[in-house]
Image (spheres, rainbow, N blue to C red):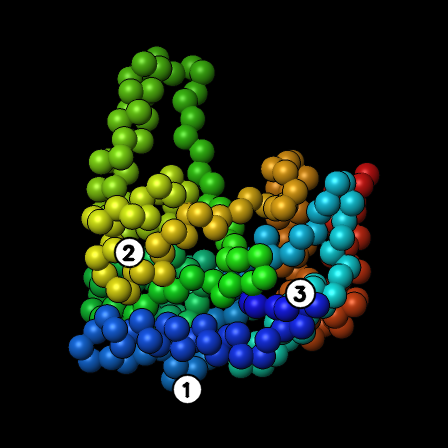
Amino acid sequence: MRMTSAGTVLADAWNRFILNISASAAASTSTPRSPSVDVAPPMLMPIVCGPAAVLIGSFRASRVVLDSDATRAALKYFMALSEVSSSLAPQFDELTNNTAFLESQISMTQNATSIYWNASQDKRDLAAVMNHARYPEGPAGTHQLAEINLIAIFNHTRNEAAAKDWIRFMMQGDQRRSKSIESSLFFAPPLAKFSDDHQMPWNTEQKFAGFRSSADAVRGPGWPGPASVEGSLVYANGSILRMFQAVGNGTMAVNEAISAASNELRRVYET
């Protein structure tokens, strides 16, 4: 989602995003068939699930600043996007949006490479014309939610030394590279230093080029504030997500949705 410094949404941002995907599709297959909203409406709500957590600077020095022109511009753009998106989108979760894409009910969705992997196994004709792209760039660049998975060793383990050795082994460059390629996992933060690695799929296949350097754009809940319990609580509560959902489905006006979300954030940050 691209905005000017004044917070005005550039109307053609989403169109450019779709055109970029289409151009990548044409470059990566000899029989180009690019995603098109004429075929099926794009996914909507899960597009927001990731970026919404870091889309807006809602925290600054223990003060909630969600009520801003930039937030209003983002919500108004989202309302326009809702009008051309699948009516089923609010019901989708991380599994059903995959199914909807694979069944051609939608033509675009926010996802990692799991849909492509499934298609490569069972729907190879579809996989051949699929593509991936980074989120549209805003005034401060491209941002996405960090998929944080912890690696821990229980205190009661009887094999602490062996467990530590296994972690060291799996974190070696060769292992991280090979396992990422095998699992089609191209977006994990540990791969931040692999952008120029000539063996990684984003440097060998055009359809994966959108994942190149994506780890550099990850942000934690509550960004640009520091990592905190409060930021994680706001993310877990879904306050920002519900704000977008409310204007998308018409249950709240823009200012009403901002006020509701701001009150939720204040209860976490300011009490």
Residue 29 rendering spot, x and y as whole percentages: 21, 74
Amino acid marked by disc 2:
Trp
Chain-order first, disc 3 or disc 2: 3
Q: Nearer the viewer, mark 2 or mark 1?
A: 2
Position of residue 52 relative to residue 7, above or below, is above
Mark 3 closeness class: few <14, some 14–19, many ≥20 residues within 10 Å: few
Residue 196 rendering spot, x and y as whole percentages: 29, 48
Residue at image position (41%, 86%) is: 38
Residue at image position (75%, 40%) is: 61
* Whether residue 87 is visible: no
In the picture, measured across the screen, residue 119 lies left or right of residue 230, that is left
Chain-order first, disc 2 or disc 1: 1
The residue to which callout 3 is attached is 5
Residue at image position (76%, 72%) is: 253
For the residue pair 235 and 140, the one nearer the viewer reads as: 140
Question: Marks 3 and 2, Cα distance to the nearest angstrom?
Answer: 32 Å
Amino acid marked by disc 1:
Asp
Mark 1 closeness class: few <14, some 14–19, many ≥20 residues within 10 Å: few
Specify the quadrant that holds the C terminus.
top right
* Local SS, label 1: loop
* Local SS, label 3: loop
Question: Marks 3 and 1, Cα distance to the nearest angstrom?
Answer: 32 Å
Specify the quadrant that holds the N terminus.
bottom right
Q: Residue furthest bottom?
A: 38
Mark sitting on residue 38: 1
The residue to which callout 2 is attached is 202
